Image: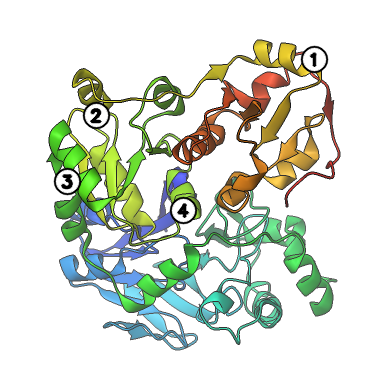
Amino acid sequence: MKVEQIYTGCIAHAAYYIESNGEAAVFDPLREVGPYIERAEKDGAKMKYVFETHFHADFVSGHLDLAKKTGATIIFGPTAKPQFDALVAEDNQEFKVGDYTIKTIHTPGHTMESTTYLLIDENGKEHGIITGDTLFIGDVGRPDLAQHVIADLTEEKLAAHLFDSLRNKIMPLSDDLIVYPNHGAGSACGKMMSKETTDTLGNQKKTNYALRADMTKEEFVKELLTGLTAPPGYFPKNVLMNIQGYESLDKVMDRAKKPLSVDEFELVANETRPLILDTRPAELFAKGFIPNSINIGLDSNFAMWVGELIPDIKQEILLVTEEGAEEESIIRLSRVGYDNAIGYLNGGFASWKNAEKETDVVNRISADEFAKRAASGDVKVFDVRKASEFASQHVKGAENTPLNTINDYLSQFPKEEPFILHCAGGYRSMIASSILKSRGWDNFVDVEGGFNAILEKDVAVTDYVCPTTLL
């Protein structure tokens, strides 16, 4: 049986495509559905089903557009209540895709409608399980997301359901089944996912902490909930979009793919007060940018940081991108439900600079210069990495303000006294720099190369969390 994993690294997401005897199906598709349609056309196959493992929180799924464009039927697991046409399957219900059989296994816990799909080949042999967020490689789905939509679904209740689903529905299955999860390392839907994106169920039974045979339900709940950080603020909004429906991506693209001249861009910015989002790499942004714009570069976890740092999912956005990256920026915004981009600067930042409009820069220093300043002992250093990264190792005397909390802790940054900002490699600290710049700070420098570069220099570091850390 051939199962094609379509992995999107920037949001650590895996969709799956299968085809048999002229019929095709997709599991957990992304918002942009063109690649799935093209894949089926290449096989000469008709898209029959769009299977959803659950109502996703970390991205807006493409089920509606895919169904509309292909005529495919949307399938959800038991208890799901979508507000659009879909088939809500019963536990153990089977669906045919050509000569393949897809069996629904209801596995509540991550969410109540969470469902695993058992894949059975043309010979009747069980091949693998598409597990959604029920089972990851090295981890299981966090059980604290549904309560942000339905208050009665506490994390303890969901964790108990997940324990039962794993023990009663997943672990009795054959060890040679291949596990196909919805996410890999980097996703906020779990806390310790592997970089591997598939494995055998037998190996997961041996290595995954959540599948220990001798674990009690109470031990499972405690281990699962320990160490969970707050989920990104956009998660509940994406869940609702996936339940209620959303605007077609085609309409979103038509509205956003508007090239604006420098004068038009400036007029729209002044009249409507949108967020100016610059998606260029950190090193380009630092050398020059439009005042008050926020930098979130496409070259890393763009969608996740957009969701973390832009609180209003309906925020109107003007884009500044590298030339040729306009469409990619719009698509990546739409993946997490930010559908209100209203245009982009034609010609990018170069056109703004050539028009002799006002610009700003972020001053950066090398790791060598940082080492010299740190040696003086009287420099204030802010580390915007995650608390767990900071706890592992950090510059002695540095203060930790994780980037996802920066808007809540702006008062921690001095207005007059100079300070130094860094993250691990420079991506997150440039986001932080742009936020600080937009709020009036101009008395800091950013470390080029971040903590990774600092470690190569003779700088005192420590491996315990200092009292000033903000968790």
Mark pair 3, 1: CA separation:
50 Å
- State which mark lies toward you, 3 or 4: 3
Instruction: From the viewer's side, name the closer residue of 17 and 435.
Output: 435
List x then y, in percent, for residue 384. 64, 39
Whether 266 is drawn above or below 19: the answer is above
Q: Earlier in the sequence, mark 3 or mark 4?
A: 4
Horizontal placement of 332 versus 204: left or right? left
Dot 3 and dot 2 residues touching (CB under 8 Å): no
The amino acid beneath tag 3 is Lys
Task: Let me know if residue 211 appears in the view.
Answer: no
- The quadrant in which residue 418 appears is top right
Q: Earlier in the sequence, mark 3 or mark 2?
A: 3
The amino acid beneath tag 1 is Ala
- The quadrant in which residue 154 appears is bottom right
Mark pair 3, 4: CA separation:
25 Å
Pointer 1 residue: 375
The label shown at residue 13 is 4
Mark pair 1, 2: CA separation:
40 Å
The label shown at residue 257 is 3
Q: Earlier in the sequence, mark 1 or mark 2?
A: 2
- State which mark lies toward you, 4 or 2: 2
Q: Earlier in the sequence, mark 3 or mark 1?
A: 3
Q: Please name the residue shown 40% across and 71% down the image.
A: 52
Pointer 2 residue: 348
- State which mark lies toward you, 4 or 1: 1
Mark pair 4, 1: CA separation:
43 Å
Q: Earlier in the sequence, mark 4 or mark 2?
A: 4
Instruction: From the viewer's side, name the closer residue of 16 and 128.
Output: 16
Secondary structure beneath dot 2 equals: helix
Whether 267 is drawn above or below 128: the answer is above
